[in-house]
Image (tube, helix red, strand yellow):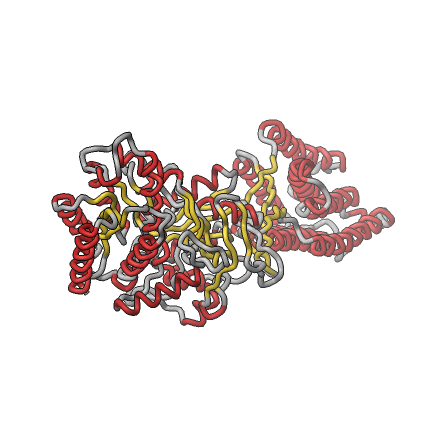
Amino acid sequence: MVSQLLFKAFFTIILLITGIEAGEEIPLYISGHFALTGRHVSWTTGLYPAALLALEHINKDNSVLPGYRLELVANDSSADPGAAIRNLMSHIGTPPTKIMIFGSAMSKEDIALAETAKWWNLVQVGPTATYADLSERARFPLYYRTRMASTTFTEAKIELMKYFGWKRAAVVHQDLALFNTPAQRLAEELLAANMTLVTMETYSFNDPMTAVAKRLKDLDARIIFVFGFEEPVLYCELYRIGMHGPRYVYIWELFRHKIYADLQVECTDEEMAIITEGTFTVEQSFIRHDAIRTVSGLTGDEYKAQYENISSSLGYRESSYHSTAYDAMWAIAIALNQSRQNLPANKTLEDFSYEDSSIADVIAESLDTLEFEGVSGPVKFTETGDRHGRALIMRVGKEFEIAPIGYYDYRSRQFEWIEAVAWEDGKIPVDKGAVEIRSMRLEPALYYAAVVIVACVMALSLYFLTYNVLYRNRRLIKMSSPNMNNLIIAGGLLVYVAALCVGDEVLVTVPKKAGMCMARYWLLSIGFTVGFGALFSKTWRVHRIFTHRTTKSLKIKDSHLYCIVLSLLLIDITVLCAWTAIDPTVVLTYTFPKEATPDGEDLFIIPILEECRCKYSGIWLGLLFGYKGVILLLGVFLAWETRKVTYAQLNDSRYIGFAVYNVTVFCSIGVPSTMFLHQRQQDLQFILSTLCITFCTTMTLCIVFVPR
């Protein structure tokens, strides 16, 4: 291949010499840099026949550079920046003088050439470089390119977001110079367009994609831009966590479902086809298929046929980027043609020298204003020397088939759709799932079931109360202190009401919840004190009567017992008043992680839980529980002391023992269970607390009243 190149170069020089002697045309030499050998030959060698074809068409066109002939002095750099610099210095040091530079094939080569060429006033037109660094005008003042820079597609991607109504996207990129800048530029432009950047993820070669994919899913990223070479690994991980289907849209910088044999991809081709179907790519339109005649007089399809013939005849592989090489050579020719009329006085193109910048400045100005129809689309350069043309929108179908669906024209800033964009479910995907904040309330059916149960046991308590009032003068009832019995029942009723207050959120709004929480403590504490205070005061009276040592009879009236119960109540009220005044309960809202609904991922629920809390609840509950514990111990003591009283109508010691045992057992089960259950298990907490309070109170009342 190198020998072919040397032969062609030699043959071209012979023709030049012959032409000059005949006085036909003045040659203008172009320093050409190609990668005809090396590891990238699969796509780089095809640029050379495209450049030769362009030269043939240019030199045959009498309207372009009349009196001149473009000649290409080509060298092979093997895609090595160092070799490219050596070749350039050889071109500069060896006659004839080269007026411009064509090439090269790789971005790194172009950077090396452009940084060097400016010191010799050589304007360069590159056909394939995409690195964003080459847009830095202060660093590369004489560099132009006919392939769009990687950052050029940012505008098309932002407009694509607007076209489909998306305002939220994530960016994922491989940590390479080729991708870092365009990814960063896209992120900045998303924010500048008042869009939301969900996350920006970076990965390196052979990095596991598990963490990246998980973050994308956790953040509910639906529109995802990807810049990188290792798409298959990321595809596979996204498939494994379920990020595929009509809800997700991937927009890739490059599309490859298979690349590099050493990549660890665990998904099958069938699975990869599922995740990639519907993927978008935004890239340059490399060959036009319309009927427009280009600057050479050919349509895009006519040019492509000629290119295939010359590549085949010369033995070079076809390149995907041949059209931009062809247009780059035409850009050089048209710029030189326009420069002829704008050169300084008494100067011609053949007067160009490496030391004089005046001709180079005119050539650069010509490129700045240049505009023509190329085989790769409209050719125009921006103020940074970048190509301004049309972006091609492509989409992946079934079995990795990729087809163009439209264009984005940078001049009109409009989309030109080849076909309507079809969506799997007929609807444009949303950029995020709807989020609903849902309060975790007690299940109403459960609460109303508890109301029915409590109503039944309250009816039983009222029956005991009615029976006790109606038959209070009967000897059996009268001797058991009916007034104290009424207090026991009243205490039980208060405790029942407190049990229902546990589910108060079914009945009251959040602002009133704090008051209901405090009322629960009041009702439960006072109900317990009234009930057990009355029961124990009766036992205290029996104890005092039967342990009285004097011969004088001892009479203890109910009023004395009322005083005991009232005294106990005063302690309760003092503690509860201090609690309410100093450290009242407040409603705190706890927010839990977002959850997908069972019927689909377009609706997410953020559960919130409102709970009553106070700063020193442990101290206040400790005081109340300790105080109640003392009452229970006192009751047990009195029951023990009166266990030998022979009057069954007076002796409640056995009932007290059962009652204390009952309270102890249910408290031992209920309190720890409700304390150690998770906050979100409020239904189970309600069931346990309600059952413990209801059964404990009901069994205590039945133990005391049923035998009577």
Residue 131 is left or right of residue 672, and the answer is: left
Can residue 72 be seen in the rendering of this structure?
A: yes
Q: Quadrant of residue 135?
A: top left
Quadrant assignment for the C terminus: bottom right
- Residue 695 lies, in percent from the top left, at 67, 55
Numbered-mark total: 0
- Residue 403 lies, in percent from the top left, at 48, 63
Residue in front for this viewpoint, 232 or 282: 282
On screen, residue 231 above or below 643: below
Can residue 541 be seen in the rendering of this structure?
A: no
Residue 29 is left or right of residue 605, and the answer is: left
Quadrant assignment for the N terminus: bottom left
Residue drawn 34% across and 68% down?
A: 309
Residue drawn 63% across and 52% down?
A: 686
- Residue 191 lies, in percent from the top left, at 47, 39
Residue drawn 35% across and 40% down?
A: 338
On screen, residue 659 above or below 261: above
Residue in front for this viewpoint, 606 or 454: 606
**Residue lying at the far right of the rendered structure:** 470
- Residue 170 lies, in percent from the top left, at 46, 48
Residue drawn 86% across and 50% down?
A: 471
Residue in front for this viewpoint, 318 or 134: 318
Residue in front for this viewpoint, 525 or 193: 193
